[in-house]
Structure formats: structure tokens, C-alpha cells
Amino acid sequence: MIQDSYRQSLWLVLLCVVLILPPVTGISLTPGSSFSMAPVIANGDPVYIHGTATGHPRGGLQVWLLGANYVKISTVSTNADNSYEYELTPANTRSLAPGQYFVLIQHPMMNGQFDIYYSPATGNVINRQLGPGTSIFQLTSAGSLQTPAGANALMQAINSQNLDDTFATTSFIVNPPSAFIDPVGDHVVGEQFTITGSTNLAVDDTLMVEITSSSFKPTSKSQNAEFSGASGSVSVKPGTGSLNRWSFPVDASTFRQDEYIVKVTGTTVDVTGSTLFTLLASRPATPATPAPVITEQTLPPVLTTATPLPTTKKSPVSLAGIIGAVTLMALVWRR
């Protein structure tokens, strides 16, 4: 019961964030976080893993770093204030293949020994409590578990009720370094504007930005070599998602009309990006909207057909009727 309580209290301690001297670049991880939503770094960026662990184990803490076809096992000691910090240097991360990496910090607890350990000779993970050399699973060599199956198997092994070891975990993702420049567009001589871009390098990493005329080239001493452009370093700022941001202000008052090349490179990480933009002497005048032009059009002749007037037909009167009427009038006249 006392041992279980000690394990639980240490687990909580391992989750605590320790405010050690913050790294200048790279990412800082505290074991105990979820494997999901892992931060992203670029090859060549350092990674700092830190936290607290009580008990001051004589053998320190065991650090397991597992990735695709990659296993690195190290130890790190605790400081007088129970803090610890483990660093993956730029040289370490530069050679890492792209993908997700799992970090497990193992504490030996009360017996002072790591009950779960790795055998480099066989590539097996050994449970010391089951007898000398008893393998639990294959971590490297033929038949080994692939990440993340190996990380899950390691957590289950250390979390066994037959052991007093405990652990905390975290993870990160490695991508090849990249630097992008946003579209610059056309500008004019004398204008002030800002060139921006994005990168997966870590916050506070340094980028060198160079702007040079595309027509600039080396000349002899007797020729007048006119340089038009600018250069300077910028720091990477926090962005959104997996990309951070950078920006470089430009004062084109000393530039001449020309096409320009923008090149951004990493100072500590091998990364390059480039684009072009044009600097005009002045903005082209916006043409006035012309008034609509009304032109005469010759319409085709319209053919009309005259409609004949209706004719009144005479009522048909027979000749006999006319003679009869005259005779009748004569008889009346006689009388």
C-alpha cells in the first residue's frame, strides 16, 4: 500500500513543469504529456526534455528514445533540486529520419535498479524480476516491434504490478527543414514594405535574408559596380499549426529599378528558399474608364405587306323583282 502511494506521488511529480533556464532555440518538452498533438521540429533543431524526479536515484533516470528504425537509450542524473534535463543536440536531430519519436523517462524507484532494461547484445527488452536474461519482446534486430508498437509494449512492461519502476512519456515529430517566402508582388523605388514567410524551424532560430538585383554581377576594379539590395538576419516568431513565421522590413529608397532576388537561408540549419519581385520606377497610371461610345447602326429594311380593305358586297336583286315593283307603282298611280 505504501509502495503504491509512493508510485502515485512520484508519477505526479514527474508530470510537473520545471522552469529551468529556457533554451534559446528548439522545443522544450515535459514528460507526462499525451502522444497526440506532438510538437514539430526540423532536422537540426535541438529538443530539451525536462521535469522533476524525487529520490535522487544513484543510477539516474533512464531515457528511451524510440522512432522508426531508431532506438537510443541514455541516462540522465537529477539535480539537487530534483530537476533533470535531457538534451537532443542539433547534431542528434540532424540525422533523424522524418517521423514521430517517442520519449520515455524511467525511474528505478525504491530498489534503485531498472527492472526493465535493454540488452544491446540481443536487441531484447529484459524484465529483471522474471529471472536473469528473460526477454519480454524484441526491440531491435530481426522480428522487432515497430514504432509505436514498441513504445506501447515498453510502457506496459514498466507499468507491470510486479515492478516498482515508473515512467513518464512525451513525443515530438521531425520534418525536413523548410523555409517559404510569401508572394512579394511589384513595388516602386522609394517604397517601404515588408517581406514575410513561414518555416518549420523552431522559434528564435535565426534566418539570413538577402535581397540582390538580378542584374548585379562581379566586375573588374576599373568598372563601376553599383550594388542595389539589402541583407540582414531575422528571428523566427511563433506561428500557427506546424509552421512559424518570419518577416524582414525593406526600405527601397536606395534601390534602383530592377528585378530582385530574395533568398532566405538558415544560419544553423541547412535550409534555403527564394523568390523574385520587380521594383518599378513609378506606379503605372490607372487608365480612366472610357465613356460608352454610341455608334449609328444601319438597320435592315422592314418589309411590310398592305392589308386590303374589306369590300361591301351588294345584296343580290333579281330583274323580275324590279319589274314587279314598277308595275305596282303604276297601278297605284292610276287609281
Image (spheres, rainbow, N blue to C red):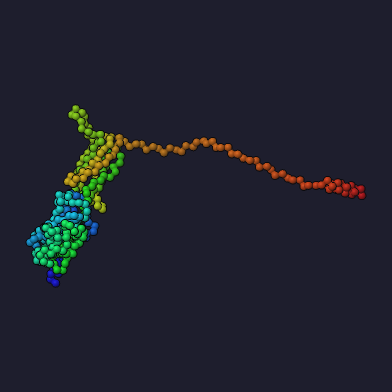
Q: Quadrant of the N terminus?
A: bottom left
Residue positioned most to the top:
222
Query: Is residue 74 rendered to the left or right of residue 306?
Result: left
Residue positioned most to the bottom:
1
Q: Is residue 18 visible?
A: no
Residue positioned most to the right:
335
Which quadrant would residue 291 be assigned to in this image?
top left
Front residue of 120 and 220: 120
Front residue of 222 and 57: 57
Residue located at (17% from left, 53% from top): 47
Which quadrant would residue 279 be assigned to in this image?
top left
Q: Is residue 257 visible?
A: yes
Residue 227 place in picture, x, y as percent: 22, 34
Residue located at (21% from left, 45% from top): 271
Residue 322 place in picture, x, y as percent: 84, 46
Front residue of 114 and 321: 114
Front residue of 27 and 143: 143
Residue 127 place in picture, x, y as percent: 13, 64
Residue 100 place in picture, x, y as percent: 21, 55
Residue located at (29% from left, 43% from top): 183
Residue positioned most to the front:
142
Query: Is residue 316 rendered to the left or right of residue 103?
Result: right
Residue located at (21% from left, 29% from top): 224
The mark total stands at 0
